[in-house]
Image (cartoon, grey):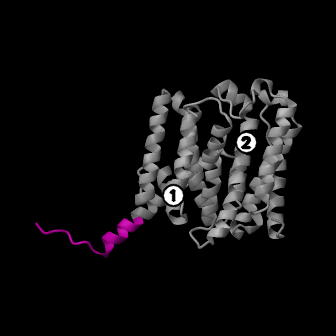
Amino acid sequence: MTAHVEGPDDARLRRDSAARYDDVAQRAAAVVIGRYSTSFGAASRLLAAPLRRHVRNIYALVRVADEAVDGVGTEHGLDDAAVLAALDELQAQTEEALRTGYSANVVVHAFALTARRTGIGPELTRPFFASMRTDAQRSEHDAGSFDAYVHGSAEVVGQMCLRAFFDGGPVDPAELAELDAGARRLGAAFQKVNFLRDVGADVQTLGRRYFPGVDPTVLTETEKRRLVDDIDADLAAARAVIGRLPAGSRAAVLAAHDLFAELNARLRRTPAAHLLTTRVSVPTRRKALIVAGAVVGARRGAA
């Protein structure tokens, strides 16, 4: 029996197969963001094409993990222990894909393509998965656990996206550190806005109370003002560095910032007592105007 000698056609077929799998994985990631996020999805369309693909790849993994602890696992018969085991498995798949560049899980594979190109490592993914586990382990937070949760669930995601914006290109470490601070503040603002606008569903459906020392069922105007003021401070800190981002990302980040600033403004105007039963949102027409304004602002250098 003659051993097969690999020729140029064999190598080409393997390359074509790998490229097709990469494409399928990234298309799957794009479906996730398209189905789950309108505001984030609208802003991401303003990114330059390679950056848009990276952000979709990041978001898909984040969304899949988040859904596991937000009721999808339970709806499919998993108890808390099984949800935690599923998260452990997803983290193991992610870390293996970071090492090898491949996963049989297409969402993990897409994430690894971006992570390996842009320098996202376990120092960012591990805090994320730790925060996801928290949702299956505790229903209330003190100041310390709240800060840790926001860091892992949102701030590190901002840092992942920041690295994606450079698309593997060189960046000065000192500049990256300053931009990281802005990315963390923006991620924190997004998360806190979502906590406040979903406060009713979180406590009534999931039994969670995120803001330390705040009982959502008797939220006062004073407490609400304190929360929206804190969010505004995060948004202002993030806004200050948007103009220093790579050009292909500025309009998208400015649009996302402005959309959440609008949400926060609407939360400020909504009576605290109504937040338990009303989910504040930005109307489609207003959202389109904000996105258009961000495009113009970025082109004029206002970012």
Q: Quadrant of the C terminus?
A: bottom right
Where residue 127 sits in the image (x, y, percent)? 55, 47
Give the vertical position of 221 relative to 58 (above or below): above
What residue do we see at 84% from left, 54% from top? 289
What residue do we see at 62% from left, 41% from top? 149
- Kindly tell me whether residue 224 is visible in this rendering: yes
What residue do we see at 83% from left, 64% from top? 297
Q: Is residue 12 magenta?
A: yes
225 sits left or right of 50 in the view: right
Give the extent of the magenta segment: 1-16
Where residue 33 sits in the image (x, y, percent)? 62, 49
As drawn, which residue projects farthest toward the bottom?
Answer: 8
- Is residue 5 or residue 97 the one in the foreground? 97
**Residue, disc 2:** 192
- Which sits earlier in the primary sequence, circle 2 or circle 1? 1
- Kindly tell me whether residue 259 is visible in this rendering: no
Looking at the rendered structure, the secondary structure element under dot 2 is helix
Question: On the image, which quarter does residue 292 sit in?
Answer: bottom right
**Residue, disc 1:** 121
- Is residue 93 or residue 218 the one in the foreground? 218
Give the vertical position of 139 relative to 174 (above or below): above
- Is residue 56 or residue 100 the one in the foreground? 100
Looking at the rendered structure, the secondary structure element under dot 1 is loop
The three-letter code of the residue at mark 2 reads Lys
Q: Quadrant of the N terminus?
A: bottom left
Task: Characterize the local packing of mark 2: few (<14), some (14-19) or many (20 or more) Cα atoms within 10 angstroms.
Answer: many
What residue do we see at 80% from left, 37% from top? 280
